[in-house]
């Protein structure tokens, strides 16, 4: 065993916990209380943050949920002297991790003057989608990602070398062609449980790289569902002790990059002769 391989296994075992023990506690009666996990995009515009609060009622309507706050100086969204940033619930989904009537709550972020933060593009997007509602805009997003070990090395790759050249990995089958299928399958089911309109998944060109598709979704739902699907992927990967990276070029050299492709149409485009 190489030192790098040993280090990766040591890191994985160090941070691993017994999920069977956890399940005993998840099965306990919640005594009429409900957990809602507030999710938001941080100051990087790429990373996701989340924290939980308890309610005496089942959260089903984002407009009936309270605005919450967090320390924006720790997320790149505020200065330390005045660090409150506010979370406005905008969409609710069933929680596949806590299950039951517990929820995931997608949120917008607002600064201490109650203005949208620099990374809150949803406000403007919603305005545009409302103006274009009569055109029924549909979106489909194809999100590529790379699975990495805790040490940042691609999951399944040899520690002292590289896998064979690209070619057999895309939509591949077999232990020598795909790495991490369990994570992909778990994420797929988590999305279905949460009500995400996940429409498919496949292994990508680079080994250890995968893609999932969300949509078609109409209007603002696309953005909300894609971000929640990204959250679910990173949480599922966390359960397996693996990192799900959205880095567009995680590995230098002649290896495929990762992106997020967009498919779009309006009602007129979808009707006969619409493409012309």
Image (cartoon, rainbow, N blue to C red):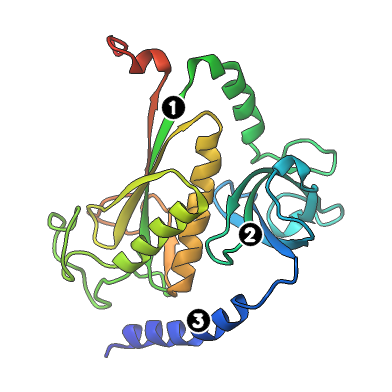
Of the pair 4 and 97, the residue shown nearer to us: 97
Q: Which type of secondary structure does the marked residue at label 1 adopt?
A: strand
Which residue is label 1 attached to? 138
Kindly identify which numbered label has been placed on residue 101. Answer: 2
| Front label number (1 vs 2) | 2
Mark 1–mark 2 distance (CA, rounded to whole Å): 30 Å
Contact flag, marks 3 and 1 (Cβ < 8 Å): no
The x and y percentages for residue 270 are 34, 18
The x and y percentages for residue 254 are 22, 54
Give above or below for 80 relative to 220: below
Of the pair 97 and 150, the residue shown nearer to us: 97
Give above or below for 142 relative to 262: below
Mark 2–mark 3 distance (CA, rounded to whole Å): 21 Å
Task: Say whether residue 154 is visible.
Answer: no
Which residue is label 3 attached to? 19
Q: Which type of secondary structure does the marked residue at label 2 adopt?
A: loop
**Image quadrant where residue 262 sits:** top left
């Amino acid at each position: 065993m190489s030192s790098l391989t040993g280090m990766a296994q040591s890191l994985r075992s160090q941070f691993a916990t017994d999920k069977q023990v956890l399940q005993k506690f998840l099965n306990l009666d919640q005594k009429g209380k409900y957990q809602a996990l507030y999710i938001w995009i941080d100051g990087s515009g790429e990373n996701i943050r989340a924290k939980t609060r308890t309610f005496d009622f089942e959260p089903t309507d984002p407009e009936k949920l309270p605005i919450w706050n967090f320390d924006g100086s720790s997320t790149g969204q505020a200065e330390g002297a005045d660090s409150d940033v506010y979370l406005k619930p905008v969409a609710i989904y069933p929680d596949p991790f806590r299950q039951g009537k517990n929820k995931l709550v997608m949120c917008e972020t607002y600064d201490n003057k109650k203005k949208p933060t620099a990374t809150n593009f949803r406000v403007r997007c919603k305005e545009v989608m409302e103006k274009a509602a009569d055109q029924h805009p549909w979106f489909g997003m194809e999100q590529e990602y790379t699975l990495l070990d805790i040490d940042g090395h691609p999951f399944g790759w040899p520690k002292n070398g590289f896998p064979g050249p690209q070619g057999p990995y895309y939509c591949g089958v077999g232990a020598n062609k795909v790495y991490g299928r369990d994570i992909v399958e778990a994420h797929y089911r988590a999305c279905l449980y949460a009500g995400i309109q996940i429409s498919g998944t496949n292994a990508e060109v680079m080994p250890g790289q995968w893609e999932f598709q969300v949509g078609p979704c109409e209007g603002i739902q696309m953005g909300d569902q894609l971000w929640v699907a990204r959250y679910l992927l990173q949480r599922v990967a966390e359960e397996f002790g693996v990192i799900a990276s959205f880095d567009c070029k995680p590995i230098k050299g002649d290896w495929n990059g990762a992106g997020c492709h967009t498919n779009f149409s309006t009602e007129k485009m979808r009707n006969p002769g619409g493409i012309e």
